Structure formats: structure tokens, C-alpha cells
Amino acid sequence: MAAAVELITAPWNLGLRPPAPGREPGTWQAPQALLAAGLEARLRPARVVQLDRPPYEFDAQPATRIRNGVTIREHALRLGEAVQGALSASRLAVVLGGDCSILLGCLLGARRGGRCGLVHLDGHSDFRHPGNYDASSSLGSAAGMDLALATGRGELLLSHWPAVGRPLVADEDVVQIGDREDEEIPPVTRFTAQEIQQIGIADLGERVISRLERRGLDRVWLHIDLDVLDERALPAVDSPGRPGLDFSQLAELISTLVGTGRVVGLDAAIYDPDLDPDGVYATPIVDCLASALTSLATVETHA
């Protein structure tokens, strides 16, 4: 079990399509919004690492058919170093995004410490890759590809990494939770949103832990795309939908998984303050994360 929390901010929107011509997605603002809503005060992290905001490009970059692909790789490498540093200090890395493409840097940093599984909480499978869409007709968006890229599918630019190679995580070491769409995904363990409604959060937690135990996974990264929440709980995401979890269910699940001691880090992604002009959703997100991680809060001074 990590002795303390280290907060890492990854303020980017690189993996998302423009919501309108000439307009950037607003997810880059989420880390600061969550800090301003009291997350740092609630978690009392041993350290806060704030990464730079990368530039967003509307047009295709050379040698890639993934939007902002070159920039994503550059900043994923930097994020990976930050995550690796937190884990080397025996801290739980908590990464505040940003869009879901931050998962690549998170897993890269975790994998540098050895094998690492992935629990992927997301209202979508995020399994888009050139094998299931025409990459020549449109730019790919990495936020809808993160699971495919993490499991080694897609352009080498974002699927093959220094010192780790590919994949970042084996199909068999992935548990996907919350997908509300009926689409083909790789042979990963999967609990759909509809199935979760039937079995409940407590049973879900037991089944996920059982799967991790059977795979012998003592190191796991937890990815939280906040659109796993029902749109009635959190509409301020780029692709809201239903059914989904409520905040109390999400907090219970995170707490259960982190409590096993297997989770080395987690990221929270896709909250868009531009879609929350009155700022009403930052506080429940902070409450959810803070309540789930209360046992890890520390009174250490910042490094």
C-alpha cells in the first residue's frame, strides 16, 4: 500500500475532437478546477506535481493520423516520468486530467516498475483503432482509442514505448467496467453498465478483485473516465449517457479497489469545466475522490 498520495496534474485536451470549429475542448481546465474545489486540501498530498499544458492543434500533424499524436507522445513521456517518480517514492499517484489519452503516460510510468494490470472505468470501450475504422477518412482521437493503444493496437507512435515496448498492458490483464455500448472489444474481462445495474457495486468489487487475484496482479492502474457516471449525476463530459454509476457507487468501488493494496495509481479524466459554467460539478467530483481515498490522506509537508 502506498504510504501517501502524490497529485499530478495533466492539463490537456489533446485526445478530443474540437466541440465546434476553431474551439478547443475544455478538459485542460479540469485539474485546476478540482484543486480549486478543495481536492488538495482534502487529500493532503505529500507532493503536488503540475505539468505544463501542451498546445492543441486543429490540423493533422505530419506522419500521424491521430489528432495531436506527436504532442500526445511527447507529453505522455513526461507524464510517465512523473508517475514513475511518485511510485518510486512509494506514493499512490493520483493524476488529474485532462482527457483519456493521459492513460498512456500513466501506464507507461507504472510499467517501468514491472507488470501492471488495468482496471478501466469508462462509459465507452475506447477501443477505436485502424482495424475497425477508416483512418484515411478522418483524424483519430486518442481519447476514444486509449484502451486500444494501451493494449498495443494502432499507430506505433502511441502504442510502442521506450524501455517497455508494446503493449503497455496485456488483454488478459484488463478489466473494463461501465461500457454502455454494445460493440466488439478485445478479450478483456468486461462488466457492462447494464450488468452492474443487476449485480450491484459490492458484487462487482468482489468479482473484479477475484479476477485480479486469478491473474496474479499485485500492481494495477485504475483509470476513471468520469463519463462512467450516469449523465444525471454528471452531464459535464463530452459524451454523457445512461445508465451509469452515481457518485456514491463510484466512491465505493474506488475505495474497495484501492483498499486491496493492489492499486499503484489512478487517473480521473474527461470532466469539462466549459460544460459546467456554474461550477456545480467540481465539488461532487472532489467529494467522491476524497471520500474514496480518505485512508491515504497524509499530513506530510509538500516536497
Image (spheres, grey):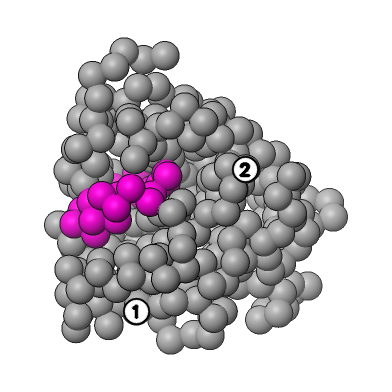
Could you tell whether 109 is left or right of 71 in the image?
A: left
Q: Is residue 274 magenta?
A: yes
Q: Is residue 171 magenta?
A: no
Could you tell whether 223 is left or right of 200 in the image?
A: right
Residue sitting at 78 percent across and 72 percent down?
136
Residue 112: which numbered mark, if any? 2
Report the quarter where the C terminus lies: top left
Q: In this rendering, is residue 16 above or below 176?
A: above
In this figure, which residue is indicated by the disc labeled 1?
192
Could you tell whether 141 is left or right of 48 in the image?
A: right
Question: Which label lies toward us, 1 or 2?
Answer: 2
Residue sitting at 32 percent across and 30 percent down?
4
Whether residue 4 is visible to the viewer of this picture, yes or no, is yes
The span picked out in magenta is 251-276
Instruction: Give the mark, 1 or 2, whose residue is nearer the N terminus.
Output: 2
Q: In this rendering, is residue 297 above or below 80?
A: above
Task: Check disc 2 and give the amino acid type.
Answer: Arg
Q: Secondary structure at mark 1?
A: loop
Q: Position of residue 299 (x, y in %)?
A: 23, 19
Task: Check disc 1 and give the amino acid type.
Answer: Thr
* 92 vs 12, nearest the viewer: 92
Q: Position of residue 33 (x, y in %)?
A: 32, 34
